Image: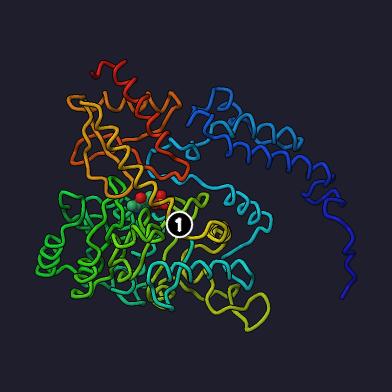
Amino acid sequence: MPKIDKNASSGASGSDLDPTDWAEFRALAHDLLDDLITHIETVRQKPVWQKPTAEVRARFSRSLPHAPNALSTVFDDVRAHIMPFATGNLHPLFMGWVHGAGTPVGMIAELVAAGLNLNCGGRDHVGIDVERQIVLWMREALGYPADASGLFVTGSSMANFLALIIAKIEALGPLSRETGLRSADHALVAYTSSEAHGCIAQAMQLSGLGSANLRTIAVDSLGRMRSDELRAQIARDRAQGFLPFLIVGTAGTVNTGAIDPLEDLAAIASEENLWFHVDGAIGALATFSPELRSLFSGLEKSDSVALDFHKWGHVPYDAGFLLVRDGTAHKRAFAQSAAYLQRADRGLAAGETWPCDLGPDLSRGCRALKTWMTIEVLGADRIGRSIAQTCALARHLAERLQGHPMIEIKAPVALNIVCFGIRGARPEMLRELILDVQESGTAAPSWTMLNGELVARCAIVNHRTTSADLDGFVSALFERMSELGFE
Ligand SMILES: *Cc1c(COP(=O)(O)O)cnc(C)c1O
């Protein structure tokens, strides 16, 4: 073999893309890292959110730079034009939608993953082992068997989509991967509740099955799928010649945090021989909390679960995950033979199953590393306690809000989400109030529709949120309400 000069440092040739001055790079990088750590440490002192200024918007509408810029100039851009204008979800009073807050250790993990630039589509390296470690942990946490398989994806939208594809191929047979929907004699129909996340209907659209073939089953007064209605709808569909293939239950709905009767759904799926998938985007990680775990009984009987480490697990975006009971069914849906992906019994091409056999992504980053470091450093129990704490805080918030004679809680607080309205207020006024609060920088609630009615919604996901933060929010909200004439 030719001799390689192992003492030469990168950057010395001038034609590579590494820094020419490593000492300068090291110093500037350390400074930026310090600033990021301070940013997280002092996030409570800053506005939750502020709109990017005109100057910021202008900064990001320039044309392609052909010449280099000094590293320090670009780092200063990051400080001035990016860091102050982020989503806001680090802040304890960010309560809009359902956003994770991240953690400092997750940030460092991203740095490590990017530094090593792991490509986790396949091949034999430790990144694949780290991902397998998470599969092992999630099998354990969710009560899945030892041959269950798992895969990191962007988020639960993608995980739900992949689960639907697996269920479809199991229903139609593996040949349908080639023949498509022509191998179906009957139209496939799936079932979910009227409170299911919109990505389920979208998955039906993307799969070619069509969202008209998704039956949305009515919910009870607690927002949970009605299993009697589900049974009746399956019977009607069978009588009409449809082919039921999938039930999608939700463990923590996006609107109110309601948990479908998972035991009942598992029993129906088993009797009817349907795939039982659970959208656990919000709720699945609540099984880390002994106090909450029993609410999710039946989850362990599902065929697949979608979940998000980036929500209640606070792994930095993005870190969605799919767990599939029957690992061979999972692989059957996605594995393909390509010459450049051939395996060997040794060397870099070793390994029987690679992540690229379990989903459509080939090149993919190492979402597993930040998940592993987060759970390894914090421990599942501590994450579980912070999840349980957000649920307690949601109940506290609901109580405090009810201290105002005009405020009405609009849905039972099943987990960590509080939906409320203002008696007699027109929907536009409620929207204006929420937008005012967002723009003031004090807090970020959002809104949703419940039973056709616009309601304000606070999802307490953030591990940093305290009852004092929420009391401050309630005071600010009441004050703004009185300025707007809600007395
Ligand atoms: C957030 C969410 C999704 C979508 O997950 P992403 O990670 O945003 O793709 C799906 N279902 C439920 C219940 C959710 O809360």
Residue drawn at 32 percent across, 74 percent down: 170
Q: Quadrant of the N terminus?
A: bottom right
- Name the amino acid type tagged 1: Gly
Q: Secondary structure at mark 1?
A: strand
Residue drawn at 27 percent across, 27 percent down: 430
Q: Position of residue 297 (x, y in %)?
A: 28, 65
Residue drawn at 37 percent across, 31 percent down: 471
Where is 125 relative to 15, above or below? Answer: below
Q: Going by the image, does 130 lie left or right of 421?
A: right
For the residue with label 1, is its CB less than 8 Å from the closest atom of ligand 1?
A: yes
Q: Position of residue 29 (x, y in %)?
A: 73, 43
- Residue 178, quarter of the rendered image: bottom left
**Which residue reaches farthest bottom?**
345
Where is 302 relative to 210, above or below? Answer: below
Q: Going by the image, does 437 lie left or right of 230?
A: right
Q: From this viewpoint, is residue 321 visible?
A: yes
Residue at image mark 1 = 320
Q: Nearer the viewer, residue 418 or 281?
A: 418
Colour mapping: rainbow
Residue drawn at 34 percent across, 47 percent down: 391
Q: Quadrant of the C terminus?
A: top left
Q: Position of residue 152 (x, y in %)?
A: 49, 62
Q: Nearer the viewer, residue 481 or 326?
A: 481
Number of marks: 1
Q: From this viewpoint, is residue 160 visible?
A: no
Q: Position of residue 2 (x, y in %)?
A: 89, 72
Badge 1: residue crowd in 10 Å (few <14, some 14–19, many ≥20): many
Where is 19 relative to 3, above or below? Answer: above
Q: Going by the image, does 7 lie left or right of 177?
A: right
